[in-house]
Image (cartoon, rainbow, N blue to C red):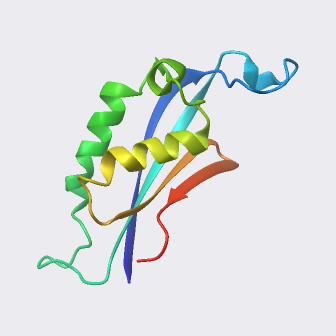
């Protein structure tokens, strides 16, 4: 199995609901997010790629137009704007366009990340 990944960055604000009032994430705050898309294939294409990285510009365009410098609560409602929900949302957006996609990883800080990936295959 061949695997590739590519990272994209954006900044956005959010506040999480369902947490105790004293939890810091209930207040509006921001992150410098890193989105990593993970693709895999059993075979390489005629050029020797899983996917040409240049073909992933659609991910950057989506992030720049829809997520960068926005309030994720507005975009993701009624879902809570957790990293886990954001990973699943982006997976659902990109999977029809990128059949090789098997996981989306969201990092809110250099030490944390959440991954949504499909089982098997």
Residue at the far left in the pictured view: 46
Front one among 41 and 19:
19
Task: Locate residue 20 relative to residue 93 in the image: left or right.
Answer: right
Q: Which residue sits at x=11%, y=79%?
A: 46
Q: Which residue sits at x=74%, y=20%?
A: 26
Would you place residue 85 above or below residue 2 in this image? above
Q: In which quarter of the image is the N terminus?
A: bottom left
Give how far across and how far down residue 117 sits, in percent. 50, 61
Give how far across and how far down residue 78 sits, in percent. 53, 25
Q: Which residue sits at x=88%, y=19%?
A: 22
Would you place residue 70 above or below residue 79 in this image? above
Task: Locate residue 41 relative to residue 48 in the image: left or right.
Answer: right
Q: In which quarter of the image is the C terminus?
A: bottom left
Would you place residue 57 above or below residue 16 in this image? below
Q: Which residue sits at x=56%, y=32%?
A: 32
Residue at the far right in the pictured view: 22
Q: In which quarter of the image is residue 49?
A: bottom left
Would you place residue 59 above or below residue 75 in this image? below
Front one among 88 and 31:
88
Give how far across and how far down residue 12 sits, in percent. 52, 24
Front one among 83 and 35:
83
Q: Quadrant of residue 84?
A: top right
Task: Locate residue 93 relative to residue 18 in the image: left or right.
Answer: left
């Amino acid at each position: 199995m061949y695997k590739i990944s590519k990272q994209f960055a954006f900044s956005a604000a959010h506040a999480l609901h369902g947490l105790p009032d004293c939890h810091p994430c209930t207040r509006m705050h921001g992150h410098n997010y890193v989105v990593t898309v993970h693709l895999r294939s059993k075979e390489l294409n005629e050029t020797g790629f899983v996917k040409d990285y240049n073909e992933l510009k659609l991910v950057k365009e989506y992030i720049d137009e829809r997520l960068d410098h926005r309030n994720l609560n507005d975009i993701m409602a009624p879902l809570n704007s957790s990293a886990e929900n954001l990973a699943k949302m982006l997976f659902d957006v990109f999977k029809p366009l990128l059949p090789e996609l098997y996981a989306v990883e969201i990092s809110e800080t250099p030490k944390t990340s959440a991954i949504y990936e499909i089982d098997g295959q």
